[in-house]
Amino acid sequence: MNKIITISRECGTGGHIIGEKLAKKLGVDFYDREIIEQTAKKSGFTNDFVEEQGDRITNSILFNIANSLTYANQVFAGNGVSLADKVFFVQCDVIKELAAKGPCVFVGRCADYVLKDREDCINVFVHGKKEDKIKHYMETNQCSAKEAESAIKKRDKSRANFYRYYTDSEWGVVGNYDITLDSASIGIDKCVDILYNICVGK
């Protein structure tokens, strides 16, 4: 295994579980929460603050989206960067440093974009049907179908806006990934098997 796997996922698809199981099966490092912890340590911000900025949209980002300003445009235009921007910048450094250590699995954090210049990356997007995502979210979070649907819609919209703002690309568009998987139709373990076989060349 000499690949780096990045997993982007819709809320309620089990993308984190897939990434964790895949890393364990491959015998490589798994990065999700660790990215938050290392970003906090390196930036001086608290873990909670970094996690809050992770893939959620702040008012300043929403303002810039409304005015058609991407992160890159802001910087090149000489505009001041927000605390959220600073967190993202440090997070990018952390992801690159972790990737430089060797084969691993990343979940979220725009890792596919951050590592786009590496030829050893396999970028995955995990998706699912609305009803399947609601069912999974309900089981995982012990909530009603209405609460699950609202949370999923809010989280996916936030992730899409965050990704668009920082990468100037569209989150979840098939052409932006090497492989997409419907985790409910295929099954969590089968998704892991498929990615494992791709990584080891089977």
Image: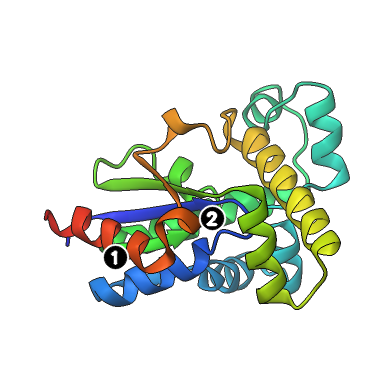
Choose the circle earlier in sequence order: 2 or 1. Answer: 1
Residue at image point 33% right, 68% down: 22
Closer-to-camera residue (85/9): 9
On-image quarter of the N terminus: bottom left
Vertical placement of 171 versus 51: above or below?
Answer: above
Mark 1 Cα shell of 10 Å, populated few (<14), some (14-19), many (≥20): few
Q: Position of residue 45 (x, y in %)?
A: 72, 68
- Residue 82 visible, this orientation: yes
On-image quarter of the C terminus: bottom left
Vertical placement of 121 versus 19: above or below?
Answer: above
Residue corresponding to mark 2: 108
What amino acid does circle 1 point to?
Lys
Is label 1 in a helix, a strand or a loop? loop
The quadrant in which residue 95 appears is bottom left
Q: Position of residue 2 (x, y in %)?
A: 18, 58
In the figure, is residue 12 to the left or right of 23? right
Residue at image point 78% right, 29% down: 65
User: On residue 185, which mark appears?
Assistant: none
Q: Residue furthest left?
A: 202
Residue at image point 88% right, 44% down: 59
In the figure, is residue 61 to the left or right of 113? right
The quadrant in which residue 123 appears is top left
What amino acid does circle 2 point to?
Gly
User: On residue 101, which mark appears?
Assistant: 1
In the figure, is residue 125 to the left or right of 197? right
Q: Position of residue 167 (x, y in %)?
A: 57, 34
